[in-house]
Structure formats: structure tokens, C-alpha cells
Amino acid sequence: LYQGEEKRELNPDRLKQLTELSRSDYRPYEIVKQPRQVPEEYKPKQGEIDLGTTYKRDFNSYKAQPVAIVRPLERQQAKQGKLDTVPTYKDDYRAWDIQKTDLYKPEQTYHPPAVKFGNSTTFQDDYVPREIQPRQSFKPSPVIKRSTVPFNGDTSHRLDYVPYQLEFKFSRPKEVYKPTAQPFEDLTTHRYDFQGLVGESAKLCRPPYTRVTQNAHFEGSTEFRESFQPWEIPPPAVKKTPEYVPPPGTMQLNSTSHLDYVPYQTKRVVPIRPVSQKRNNNFPFQGKSTTKEDFPAWESCRQGLIKKQQQIPNPSGKFDGWTTFRSHYVPHELNPTQSCKPVHAPVKSSAPFDDTTMYCLEYTPKKREICPASFPSPPGYIFENTNSRGHRFFRKIT
């Protein structure tokens, strides 16, 4: 029972009944791995196997002869002398003596002249080369005309800006931190309420765990290792490639184009176009145009800014940095509220802590029994039969 808890009295009959129900319902069992069923050794049956089938019984074999070839025998023609025959085509269609007909094309009376052609064309007769006279340039001279007037560097900002003298900014003095004279209370509710109790640690009533294991040595050989033994695999045979042997003799690199082509000496065709009369003019380019003459550049001055007159006058005097909060705020001295929590002092006792529980009082340790199913032939049981799944059933000896 815990400290501060009222003691309850249970009916002894009811307590005994609960203890018997707990012992009958909750029994400790040891989980053991189910033993593997060893297959029975194969024993071949004595006698011979009847390999007769219904096909062999019903089918009667017959002796068949190969089918004779119906194709006629090949007759070999004997070649004794030269065959002198005339086919029907040559006998029916004989060549006739046809005379060549004369051409009705008129004779060509034009003969090309042997003298060189020296007549001029209509373009050469009508075109008269004339001397090109350069046009007068109306382009203004690209020389920059520098002004003798000094540069006016005044801007609207320099003209309108009025410098003002800045006044000294008011700074509020920093308040000095004043620590309190009272000592700091660092006692928390946890330290105040839980100061610790002197007692011994609870003892475990659980019985020691002993695991039942088999002491038989495990054989490392398996059915797979016994059935499939490693075989030596010979390396694959490598096929040797035959050594290349060039063919004897020289290679002929002549082609049909090299053998049949005959080069001819020809002259290049001379163009019949007239000779261009190019003239080199060393006159300067006149880049003056009518647009530049009609629209000369005018001197223009930049218009000044149109500023609106200021309606609100600028403030005069020293700036007061006080806000409404600072002017209306009144500091008050803080009074700490009095704690109304009752004094909670733990009740200390010199008696030792009573840590006995109902489980420690009512628990009765039992001896763990080994399951008889873990033995190949359990003692105190007689073998009855084995079902289709391979489970063996035993009957207890009475």
C-alpha cells in the first residue's frame, strides 16, 4: 500500500477464488521450435514395370514398301554429228533486198564567213561617253564652332536651395539600472514540494528465466550441398584467326575512264560584252541636301521650372521632442501582491517506507516444466497414430 492510502479488507474466500482463477488461466509455457519431420527412406518395389499401353495393344504393324517413282526415265540423246536444221522462223521470214531511200532535205547554201566579225552593235553606235561633272556640295562644314561665352553652370537646385543651420538634437539621458536590495528567491515549487523520501528499492519477485536448449551438435551438410557437387568447368576454346597473306602480283589501278578518255586541246570562250570605261574621280563628296538648306538648326534655351509658391510657412523655434504618451504618463511605484498560497510543509516520518504490494504477497513461484512434445519419444506417453499432415498423436499412460 502507498503512503496516505486507506487499507481495504478483502473477503478471504473471494481472494482465494481470484487466486485459483489466475493460476488456472495464466500458465507459463515455453515456446520450443517444432522438430522437423525426417522423411522416410525410399525403397524401390521389386519386380518389373509393365510398360504396355493401349496404343501398342490396339495398333497392328504392317510392313510397307517404298512408293515407286512415276517420273519417266531420262532419255539420253546421242551426239554423233553436227545438227544442220532451219527453224520455222528463218524459213517463213526471209531477208529482202531493200534499197536505201534518198533524203528530201534541201541543200544547205549558207557558208560561214572566213573573215573575223567586225561590226558594232546598236548600243555601241548610240552610246556616246561623256565626262561626268561633280555636283556642288551643299553639306555644312563639320568643323565645330566653339563659343567664346563662359559656361553657365547654374542649375535650378543651386538657385532654389536655401541652406539652413541645423540645431543641436535633444538627447534624453540614459537611466542607470538600480538593483534591488532584497535577496533573490530561487526556490521553485518542485524543490519546495518534492524533497525526497528515504526508502529501499523494490525487489523483483519474478523467477529467474532459464531457457531450455538442445545440446545436439548441428550438422552443416544439407540436401542441396550433397546433391549438387561443384564440377570443374574447362575454359572455352579460343578460335585462332588465320594470318592474312596478300595475293601475289601487282594491282592494276586502271579504270575504264582512264583507258577510254581522250583529252582534247580547247580554247576558252572570250566574252562579247563591251569594255567597261571606269573613271577615277578624285573630287570630294558633296553631301549637302535641300533638307539641310531649308531646315537650319536654331539656337534654343531651356525653359526654367515653374515652382508653386509655398502656402504653409516653415516652423520657427526649437523642436520639442515630447510625445503625448511621455507628457501624459505618470510613473507609479509598484507594490508586489501578497501571496495567499497556504504553507505546504511535507510531513516527514522516521519509520521506513512500506513497499509491500498484493502481488508480492499473493504470488507463488512455480517450477517450470518442460513440454513433452520436445522429446522424440516423450516419457509417460504411448504412440497411437500419425495423421495425413504428419502430426503424431500420443496417449498418456494411466
Image (cartoon, grey):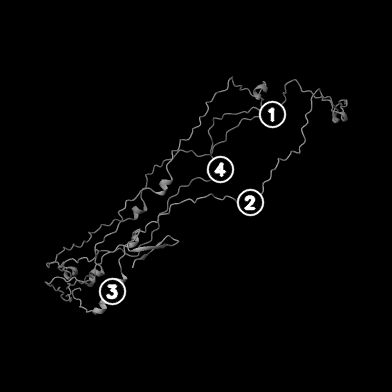
The kind of residue tagged 3 is Glu
**What distance separates the C-alpha of mark 3 from that of mark 1?**
145 Å
- Upstream in the sequence, badge 3 or badge 1? 3
Residue 290 is marked as: 4
- Upstream in the sequence, badge 4 or badge 3? 3
- Upstream in the sequence, badge 4 or badge 2? 2
Q: Nearer the viewer, residue 104 or 301?
A: 104
**What distance separates the C-alpha of mark 4 from that of mark 2?**
127 Å
**What distance separates the C-alpha of mark 1 from that of mark 4?**
37 Å
Mark 4 or mark 3: which is in front?
A: 3
Residue at 32% x, 55% y is: 161
Residue 57 is marked as: 2
Q: Position of residue 280 (x, y in %)?
A: 57, 29
Decide: is 324 above or below 126.
Answer: below
Q: Position of residue 140 (x, y in %)?
A: 50, 39
Q: Quadrant of the N terminus?
A: bottom left
- Upstream in the sequence, badge 1 or badge 2? 2
Residue 267 appears left or right of 180:
right
Question: On the image, numbered disc 1 is attached to which residue?
Answer: 124
Mark 3 or mark 2: which is in front?
A: 2
Q: Secondary structure at mark 3?
A: helix
Mark 3 or mark 1: which is in front?
A: 3
The kind of residue tagged 2 is Arg
The kind of residue tagged 1 is Gln
Residue 20 is marked as: 3
Mark 1 or mark 4: which is in front?
A: 1
Q: Nearer the viewer, residue 307 or 237?
A: 237
Q: Position of residue 326 (x, y in %)?
A: 23, 68
